[in-house]
Amino acid sequence: MKILTEMLLSQSAYSHDIDVPFEQVDIADWLFNLPEAEYQRCCPPDHISAGATTTDDGRLMSINVEKIGTGLVVQHYVADTATPAYCRMNSISDVFTPTGERTQVNVIWELIAEPLEGNRTRYTNRVTSHPTEAFLAFIEQHGQTFEQAATARQSASGDHNSRETPLFAESIARTARAKTAAR
């Protein structure tokens, strides 16, 4: 699967501040122990299912099923980096159109925690998508230009990210508070 990293399909980043000290935040622990129902609460009705697993060679993996715009997307996120303050997840994602056709895009999902004054933390959710050769062939078969596809993907992905970011942040905060209380 050839990823065309020199071409940008979409990119968005949104932040949300939480009332939890930075030292208590553990994004990797939250992500790889996220209950499915909590994932669904983080962007209703778009978030359908999530689970954690590993690749054959033992790398951490998060599988997310969600609706982005009109597409049903199955994300196969493999952790490039998974730390308490930063996760970089990389996926060759399957995208199913409303007519049931399937293509693939590359999605980089970055989950970032930064300390703020006053025992607060800023959470940033950055999502970057690149086309694959299969995606370019798919849009060509359907008479769509890359610019048209990128405009549609930017709109849908940006909208989705803007809605899930504050809910992810508050979920991370609840998890941090619960772990601190349990100590």
Image: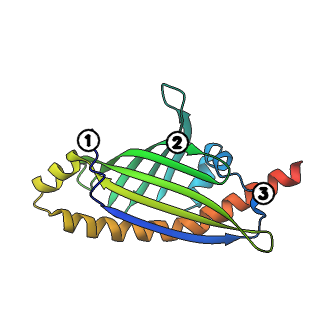
Spot occupied by residue 111 in the image (x, y as percentages of width and height): 56, 57
Q: Earlier in the sequence, mark 3 or mark 2?
A: 3
Q: Which residue is mark 1?
A: 2
| Residue furthest top as drawn | 56
Quarter containing the N terminus = top left
The quarter of the picture where residue 144 lies is: bottom left
Camera-side residue of 138 and 43: 138
Q: Amino acid at mark 2?
A: Ala
Q: Which residue is mark 2?
A: 79
Camera-side residue of 54 and 66: 54
Q: Residue at x 27, y 70 (%)?
A: 151
Cα–Cα gap, marks 3 and 2: 21 Å
Q: Residue at x 73, y 56 (%)?
A: 25
| Residue furthest front as drawn | 6
Spot occupied by residue 138 in the image (x, y as percentages of width and height): 17, 51
Work out whether 17 lies above or below 40: below
Q: Residue at x 49, y 52 (%)?
A: 48
> Horizontal placement of 26 versus 97: left or right?
right
Spot occupied by residue 163 in the image (x, y as percentages of width and height): 51, 70
Residue count near mark 1 (Cα–Cα under 10 Å), binned few <14, some 14–19, many ≥20: few
Cα–Cα gap, marks 1 and 2: 19 Å
Secondary structure at badge 3 equals helix
Q: Residue 23: which numbered mark, if any? A: 3
Q: Amino acid at mark 1?
A: Lys
Spot occupied by residue 7 in the image (x, y as percentages of width and height): 27, 58
